[in-house]
Image (cartoon, grey):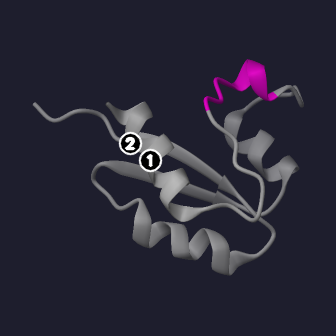
Amino acid sequence: MSAAALRILAMDNEPSVTFSLRYIFTPPRYQLTPVENGDAALARLDSGSEHYERMDVHVMFPKPFDVEALRSAVERLAA
């Protein structure tokens, strides 16, 4: 039996950023959902709250981010 995919919600107003993340976090291990703003992220999470702590968020990376640091953090969460 395979493990469930690690769900990643990528929020950025530049589509090229979330598009490039699809090449780093690929199925079937990862399920990446790109959104362009906070309202879209909240809609995806089915939450009426702006508090990310209530959304089961484990890591946030502000821009600019280091791809290797992002990959390392996600790998730790997936372990």
Percent of width and height locating residue 13: 81, 69
Q: Residue at coordinates 53% horizontally, 46% vertically from top-left? A: 8
Q: Nearer the viewer, residue 57 or 2?
A: 57
- Image vertical order of residue 63 relative to residue 20, above or below: above
Q: Quadrant of the N terminus?
A: top left
**Residue beneath disc 1:** 72
- Image vertical order of residue 3 relative to residue 33, above or below: above
Percent of width and height locating residue 29: 30, 48
Q: Nearer the viewer, residue 79 or 40?
A: 79
The disc labelled 1 sits on which kind of residue? Answer: Ser
Percent of width and height locating residue 32: 50, 55
- State yes or no: residue 45 in magenta: no
- State yes or no: residue 55 in magenta: yes
Q: Are marks 1 and 2 in contact (CB under 8 Å)?
A: yes
Give the extent of the magenta segment: 52-58
Q: Residues within 10 Å of mark 2 (few under 14, many from 20)?
A: few
Q: Which mark is residue 75?
A: 2
Q: Is residue 68 left or right of residue 53?
A: left
The disc labelled 2 sits on which kind of residue? Answer: Glu
Q: Nearer the viewer, residue 23 or 34?
A: 23
Q: Nearer the viewer, residue 46 or 29?
A: 29
Q: Quadrant of the C terminus?
A: top left
- Image vertical order of residue 77 relative to residue 26, above or below: above
